[in-house]
Image (cartoon, rainbow, N blue to C red):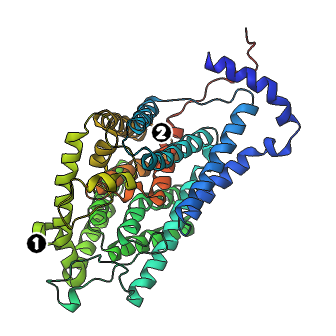
């Protein structure tokens, strides 16, 4: 019924496309806006990034209503995502702080709307997936250079980013933050977590195309981004990086194990030695990494434990619909539960955050989305014969898993810089899962 109505509207408006060069070339503008969102994320304020994302959504809507046969297609994980969005909407309606929750909901609307717009574009323009992922990689590479410069310049901390009460001067780390706004090392660490797999994918892609100069350039960006990630001092990002390395070697075994077993094992040994060397000989890095296991002895860990406890109480009292989405809404309600002196903007855990803000059923829907997304991505990697498809799907699945793993101890996931990169990554998986169907533009409507 909806498709029939859409096709009728397209028939009525098709003359616009036939007489407009802009509408005939609208895919070019959609691609430019997607690239714009990724690039703007590196330096612009959240409002400006969101505005460019709205342009992407608007152009996609215009294309759908004016291009015959064009329509949205939904797969299983997108159905779960839609259910999650509807539950967030219900949570908004039941929020006691509607105005604050509305702001958070509008952000969620833009993020998910951008995802569907990007996925819709890539499903019919798979040839541009390397460009999109390459842009993410280049932006991460740019951030890594800035971060390394900040590290050598020993930039001062803008806020209390590290517990230095029990550290000697040589054990205090210079925590870099790049150009992402607001300046925060954990935000930059999370940005590298979502982006590094894309650079790895581009490196493997160039190797498969025998473009070795570009592959070397991509390998250089992998190295600088990894070093910059360590320089952020983001401990959750450290753990996520370990996951990225392990998963990358597991996937690469599909291609290299039988023919290049010796080289493959040598690379694994080199990675282990490099990581071990960094922890043993770089004192500040070693102390930062070991603080993960300090439990309550580290003030940052202790702070998170207090937030987790209060957030669980918030969820227990609002388990059905949550308190409403958004960090400002969270902060207002959290004040009723927090331990004195431990104010917080979020739950410091993605899944706990979703449960608190939108309720148990939203959490189930989001978990279902992730499960089916990862399952579908793994199926593509295991069953496809297309090398390019395998490489890019694998790097995107690794990125999703790494972001979620990092999200167990932080919620920088909800910042626009990471959100837009993450949903672009998910859109790539959706595009590769999509199988085109015959064009129905010329089907006679009854």
Number of disc labels = 2
Circle number at residue 297: 1
Could you tell me if residue 255 is visible in this image? Answer: no
Q: Tag 1 or tag 2, which sits nearer the N-term?
A: 1
Foreground pick, 441 / 134: 441
196 relative to 156, above or below: above
Circle 2 residues within 10 Å: few <14, some 14–19, many ≥20: few
Instruction: Describe residue 252's horizontal placement relative to residue 349 as left or right.
Output: right
Foreground pick, 66 / 425: 66
Residue visible at 38% across and 49% down in the picture: 400
Image spot of residue 43 (x, y percent):
55, 70
Q: Which residue is mark 2?
A: 385
Label 2 – label 1 distance at C-alpha: 51 Å
Circle number at residue 360: none
Instruction: Describe residue 230's horizontal placement relative to residue 3 as left or right.
Output: left
Residue visible at 35% across and 34% down in the picture: 365
Image spot of residue 1 (x, y percent):
62, 15
Q: Which quarter of the picture shows residue 291? A: bottom left
Image spot of residue 305 (x, y percent):
16, 59
Task: Classify mark 2: helix, strand or loop.
Answer: loop
Instruction: Describe residue 185's horizontal placement relative to residue 64 as left or right.
Output: left
């Amino acid at each position: 019924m909806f498709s029939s109505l859409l096709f009728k509207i397209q028939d009525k408006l098709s003359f616009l496309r036939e007489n407009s060069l802009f509408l005939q070339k609208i895919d070019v503008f959609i691609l430019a806006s997607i690239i714009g969102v990724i690039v703007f994320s590196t330096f612009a304020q959240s409002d400006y990034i969101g505005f460019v994302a709205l342009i992407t959504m608007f152009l996609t809507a215009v294309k759908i209503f004016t291009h015959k046969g064009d329509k949205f297609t939904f797969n299983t994980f997108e159905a779960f995502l839609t259910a999650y969005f509807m539950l967030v909407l219900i949570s908004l309606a039941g929020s006691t702080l509607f105005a604050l929750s509305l702001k958070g909901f509008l952000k969620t609307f833009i993020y998910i709307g951008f995802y569907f717009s990007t996925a819709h574009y890539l499903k019919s323009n798979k040839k541009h997936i390397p460009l999109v992922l390459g842009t993410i990689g280049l932006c991460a590479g740019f951030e890594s250079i800035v971060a390394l410069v900040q590290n050598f310049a020993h930039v001062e901390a803008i806020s209390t980013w590290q517990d230095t009460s029990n550290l000697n001067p040589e054990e205090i780390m210079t925590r870099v933050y790049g150009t992402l706004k607001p300046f925060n090392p954990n935000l930059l660490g999370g940005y590298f977590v979502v982006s590094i797999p894309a650079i790895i994918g581009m490196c493997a892609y160039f190797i498969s195309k025998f473009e070795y100069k570009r592959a070397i350039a991509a390998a250089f960006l992998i190295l600088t981004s990894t070093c910059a990630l360590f320089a952020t001092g983001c401990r959750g990002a450290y753990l996520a990086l370990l996951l990225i390395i392990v998963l990358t070697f597991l996937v690469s075994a599909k291609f290299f194990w039988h023919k290049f077993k010796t080289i493959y094992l040598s690379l694994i040994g080199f990675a282990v030695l490099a990581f071990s060397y960094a922890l043993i000989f770089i004192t500040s890095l070693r102390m930062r990494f070991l603080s993960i296991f300090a439990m309550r002895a580290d003030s940052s860990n202790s702070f998170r434990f207090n937030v987790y406890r209060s957030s669980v109480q918030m969820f227990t009292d609002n388990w059905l619909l949550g308190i409403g989405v958004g960090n400002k809404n969270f902060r207002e309600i959290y004040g009723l539960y927090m331990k004195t002196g431990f104010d917080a903007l979020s739950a410091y855990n993605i899944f706990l955050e979703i449960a608190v803000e939108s309720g148990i059923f939203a959490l189930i829907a989001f978990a279902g989305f992730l499960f089916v997304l990862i399952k579908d991505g793994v199926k593509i990697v295991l069953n496809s014969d297309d090398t390019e498809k395998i490489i890019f799907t694998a790097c995107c699945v690794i990125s999703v898993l790494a972001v979620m793993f990092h999200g167990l101890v932080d919620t920088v996931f909800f910042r626009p810089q990471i959100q837009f990169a993450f949903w672009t990554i998910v859109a790539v998986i959706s595009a590769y899962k999509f199988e085109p169907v015959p064009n129905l533009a010329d089907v006679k409507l009854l």
